Amino acid sequence: MRKKKIVIALGHDALGTTLPEQKNATQKTAKAVADFIKDDYQVVISHSNGPQVGMIHTAMSEFCRIYPEYTATPMSVCSAMSQGYIGYDLQNAIRTELLNRGIYKPVSTILTQVTVDPYDDAFYNPTKVIGRVMTEEEAEAEEKKGNHVKKTKVGWRRILAAPSPVDIVEIDAVRALLDADQIVIACGGGGIPVLAQGNKLKGASAVIEKDSAAGRLAELVDADRFVILTGVEKVCLNFGKENEQTIEEMTVSQAIQYIEEGQFEEGTMLPKIQAAIEFIGNSAVRSVLITKLDPSREDSVETTGTVIHK
């Protein structure tokens, strides 16, 4: 009998920000992941990397500024670094949790590249703020290099495009590990954005929306369920207002209607709902659960949250 496949997208709350926070957070996250494995799912895990990749980019930029003889570190390399060290903490935490429950399953992190379209509209309208605060003079120097900058409340910052994911380069490796009944961590932080140039892959100066990449991952492994762990227990209408209303369940058509009404904010709930809609498509079998990871709760995360289906 075919095991059900599930893709779990971990948000910022599941990972923390600093190195000690991350180590502690992954131990708590591992308990929720282990619950799905205990229920005999085949599990693929994706995760955010916002604070981590920002920290790496800032550190490498500062290093290059102090030591000009070193070349600047491309954004794609910073993304690869964040995948490696987040995956390291996650896979060890999950392995320990499983062994404590008497379950032995290998856990592997795949350094994942995700192709993007060079003509994606996002490249003409970058929105993702990243990196250290710069002076106006430093910002002008960045623009001369061809980079985009933006003035924020704290000073000048670099901004990057957030193109849509097209394909996952290492998807066959993910499938092979799943077929071997192993646990896979992939597409961390949306994956490393790359441009296909013949047989060569070139890193793109961009970041991919993590929920979009996780949804694409779920689609390509033919997952039955896509779970998005975020900072709220349920999706809400009129969020933050006096007439706020939680949603237990909604259909794809309802979700589209709520988007048209402007119910979900850019950069928070909107990309999650869009990823859910794209993953479900026309399938009457696939479903999406959006909920909050609460390690203090004794029951499974599956018993709460908002469920989206066809």
Image: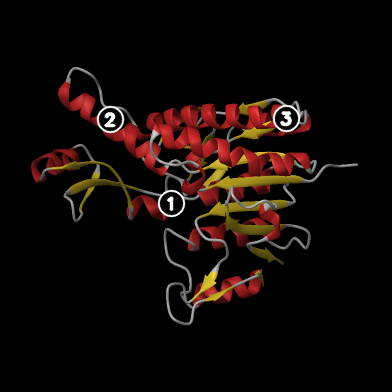
Residue on which the image places disc 2: 59
Q: Measured from the top left, where is residue 104 in percent x and y? A: 75, 26
Q: Nearer the viewer, residue 238 or 18?
A: 18
Q: CA distance from mark 2 to mark 1?
A: 29 Å
Side of 260 relative to 158 (left or right) = right
Residue at (33, 35) in percent of width and height: 55
Residue on which the image places disc 1: 120
Check disc 3 and report its element: helix, strand or loop. loop
Pick whichever of labels 2 and 1 is earlier in the sequence: 2
Check disc 1 and report its element: helix, strand or loop. loop
Side of 60 relative to 247 (left or right) = left
Q: Measured from the top left, where is residue 284 in percent x and y? A: 78, 63
Pick whichever of labels 1 and 3 is earlier in the sequence: 1
Label 2, residues with CA under 10 Å away: few <14, some 14-19, many ≥20: some
Residue on which the image places disc 3: 182
Residues marked 1 and 3 touching at CB (< 8 Å): no
Q: CA distance from mark 3 to mark 2?
A: 34 Å
Pick whichever of labels 3 and 2 is earlier in the sequence: 2
Q: CA distance from mark 1 to mark 3?
A: 34 Å
Label 1, residues with CA under 10 Å away: few <14, some 14-19, many ≥20: some
Q: Amino acid at mark 3?
A: Gln
> Seen from this angle, which residue lies furthest right?
1
136 vs 258: above or below: above
Q: Amino acid at mark 1?
A: Asp
Residues marked 2 and 1 touching at CB (< 8 Å): no
Nearer the viewer's eye, disc 1 or disc 3? 3
Side of 179 relative to 147 (left or right) = right
Q: Measured from the top left, where is residue 288 in percent x and y? A: 66, 58
